């Protein structure tokens, strides 16, 4: 009995010593300072862009705190001016953590990008678009300051896009990021979430009106060429609808594709 007790006590002492010594050694000498430590602690391969850091855990991970955004900025701070000047990525000025959307150790073939709109809501992105105009220098400084104090870990974030409840989705300023790719050309305003969700652009349950509908202009806006001489000289002549008005889409177009012209067939001029 006494021998067993001493054995367990010795094993516990060794385990406790290792639990203290290994982190200290890794902190002082780097992840390669302890044999097999990198292989034992590595949760999976890095993406192709980060694989050169494969055995240098300390390049991203901070002891006792995980991956901090400040580590990301060591390499990516040069991209900050581009992030804050592009409408599609300007929201980064209000994000205090990288790990909400950028997840690593998922394999070489996967880019470490997992867009999570919930992260934007938690960062208060609702008013981000209205806060523009503060100047590039200030925006970059703000981005660095916000990310510099982050303690987010890049491991453990959900990989499946999360569908936000309506109350949270309504706080997002969708047009602040997606305005440049708006296929509706602002015809429906900025209230994207009234039709779209945060996991896919497709509208669930949507059915196009009857092919006999004459209310196309309620949803569709004609291209710029229809407001030029091109419309009179080319479009009206090709379709045989020489008296057609721009808003009378139904006279020339079919509902399966814009290039499917009535009584002409598939026609792509440009």
Image: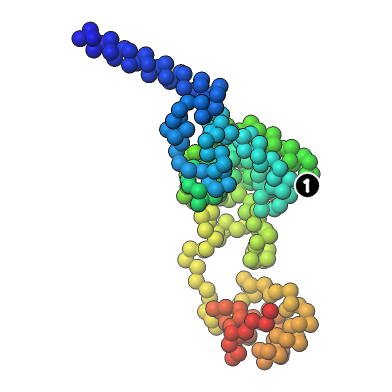
Q: Position of residue 78 (x, y in %)?
A: 71, 42
Q: Residue at x 64, y 51 (%)?
A: 173
Q: Quadrant of the C terminus?
A: bottom right
The quadrant holding residue 220 is bottom right
Secondary structure category for the residue under label 1: loop
Q: Is residue 30 above or below residue 116?
A: above
Looking at this view, is 139 or 188 the one in front? 139
Q: Position of residue 11 (x, y in %)?
A: 33, 16
Give the number of callouts. Answer: 1
The quadrant holding residue 219 is bottom right
Residue lying at the far top of the rendered structure:
2
Q: Position of residue 146 (x, y in %)?
A: 66, 35
Looking at this view, is 5 or 144 the one in front? 5
Disc 1: which residue: 133
Q: Position of residue 75 (x, y in %)?
A: 65, 39
- Residue 82 visible somewhere in the drawing: yes
């Amino acid at each position: 009995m006494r021998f067993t007790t001493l054995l367990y006590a010795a094993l516990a002492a060794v385990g406790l010593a290792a639990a203290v010594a290994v982190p200290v050694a890794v902190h002082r000498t780097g992840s390669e300072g302890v044999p097999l430590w990198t292989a034992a602690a590595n949760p999976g391969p890095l993406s192709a862009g980060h694989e050169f850091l494969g055995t240098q855990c300390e390049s991203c991970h901070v002891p006792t705190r995980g991956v901090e955004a400040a580590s990301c900025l060591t390499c990516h701070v040069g991209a900050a001016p581009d992030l804050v000047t592009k409408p599609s990525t300007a929201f980064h000025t209000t994000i205090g953590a990288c790990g909400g959307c950028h997840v690593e150790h998922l394999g070489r073939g996967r880019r470490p990008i997992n867009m999570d709109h919930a992260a934007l809501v938690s960062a208060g992105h609702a008013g981000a678009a209205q806060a523009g105009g503060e100047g590039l220098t200030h925006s970059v400084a703000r981005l660095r300051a916000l990310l510099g104090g982050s303690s987010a870990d890049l491991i453990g974030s959900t990989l499946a896009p999360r569908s936000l409840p309506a109350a949270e989705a309504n706080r997002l300023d969708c047009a602040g990021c997606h305005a440049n790719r708006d296929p509706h050309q602002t015809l429906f305003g900025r209230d994207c979430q009234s039709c779209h969700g945060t996991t896919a652009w497709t509208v669930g349950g949507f059915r196009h009106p009857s092919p006999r509908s004459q209310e196309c202009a309620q949803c569709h806006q004609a291209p710029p060429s229809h407001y030029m001489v091109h419309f009179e000289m080319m479009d009206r002549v090709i379709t045989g609808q020489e008296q057609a008005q721009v808003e009378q889409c139904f006279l020339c177009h079919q509902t399966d594709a814009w290039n499917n012209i009535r009584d002409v067939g598939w026609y792509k001029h440009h």
